[in-house]
Amino acid sequence: MASSFGNSMKVSIFGQSHAKAIGVTIDGFPTGFEIDYEELDKFMERRAPGRNAFSTARKEPDKPEFVTGVLGNVTCGVPVTALIFNKDQHSKDYENLKDVPRPGHADYTAQIKYKGFQDVAGGGHFSGRMMAPVCIAGGMSLQYLKKQGIEIAAHISSIGNISDDRIDMTDKVQSELLKVKDKEFPVINDAQGEKMQALIAEVKSELDSIGGTIECCITGLPAGIGGPMFDGIENRIAAAMFGVPAIKGIEFGNGFETATLRGSENNDSFCIKDNAVATKTNNHGGILGGISSGMPIVFRVAVKPTPSIAKEQDSVRLSTMTEEKLEIKGRHDPCIVPRAVPCIEAVAALVIMDLLLEERGC
């Protein structure tokens, strides 16, 4: 079972949460690019488990081992393959899940589709653990895009009903948002971040979990990238984002709020700024007709509460077709949102890389 996406640059993710290793193959990454391994390790640490009180207790170093496609630290023109070896699996915690599926997980649907041959340990291929190899490819892409003048940064927009400051969608620099990358808890407003952490601690003490939203901004992408209808930037980003476990919704620019506005309020007036065409506002989120406008591309995703909770839940025993109670064992995040922030940046980077390479005919 492998998961792939991309056109000019195809990214394939393989492995299972508790397998000996998980990994990624990247076919089409530009040749001769020098990877900054230290920077990549720093990016990977932002997603890695076991780093703080609001993440799972599972501890994994998540240090990639490149086995093909790189000589030293320079891409050499063949597909890049990197592995992450799992070190801290507790597979026995999942032994009964083929027969008694967890509410909110893919246990039941995977059992039906793969007829019991799927790996249930840690969620198998459906686990958020599979985002680690995505972050290898995304981390490399972020480095490449930065050299092209394109920056991608995200922050926690909300946890439950507590919100962070919104970004200025017309700001083509986003210096405040870029600072978030260096924070353990990725918010713009640290006071709001403390309230969010208190809420996460509260739901954890109640053996529960909570969700939230993440806002991501792409700056430096020139106008004219993308395509109409089914091949637009929104389409490509949305399709890839729904490959991130726990993502349940996405909006661009002002998103659903635009449904409450009049055309005169929602339209972004054009202007000339710094000798270039710009818009005075950015309700469109940097995309018009599926094509980049030159303004920052801004989108938000909704992240569901972690479905693995310690509270007793209702389930069924498939072998006897009877209802029964389920208490989930194992180590799980009370809120997946903080660790998902770099994953959103990584996936956005992969989509933009693919679009750029297409535009250049690579």
Image (cartoon, rainbow, N blue to C red):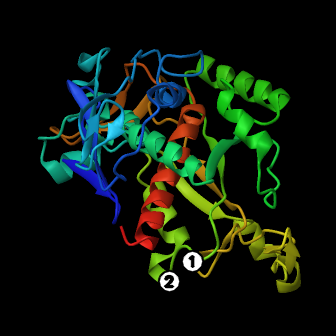
Q: Secondary structure at mark 2?
A: helix
Answer whether residue 100 is visible to the viewer in this image. no
Q: Is residue 89 visible?
A: yes
| Residue that badge 1 annotates | 290
Residue at left offset 46%, top offset 15%:
57
> Dot 1 lies on which element?
loop
Quarter in which the C terminus is drawn:
bottom left
Relative to 24, residue 291 above or below: below
Tell me residue 280's x, y (percent): 87, 72
Relative image position of residue 350 (x, y in whole percent): 45, 53
Question: How would you rate the neighbour count of disc 1 (Cα within 10 Å): few for under 14, some for 14-19, many for 20 or more?
Answer: many
Q: Any mark on residue 229, and which? A: 2
Q: Position of residue 35 (x, y in %)?
A: 43, 36
- Along the horizontal axis of the image, is 261 left or right of 243? right
Choose between 275 and 3: the one closer to the eye.
275
Of residues 162 and 203, which is closer to you in this image? Answer: 162
Indicate whether 110 appears above or below 101.
below
Residue type (three-letter) at the residue carrying disc 2: Met
The residue depicted at 19 percent of the width and 35 percent of the height is 119
Q: Sequence-wise, which precedes: disc 2 or disc 1? A: 2
User: Mark 1: which amino acid?
Assistant: Gly
> Label 2 to label 1, Cα distance in Å?
7 Å
Residue at x 16% of width, y 38% of height: 320
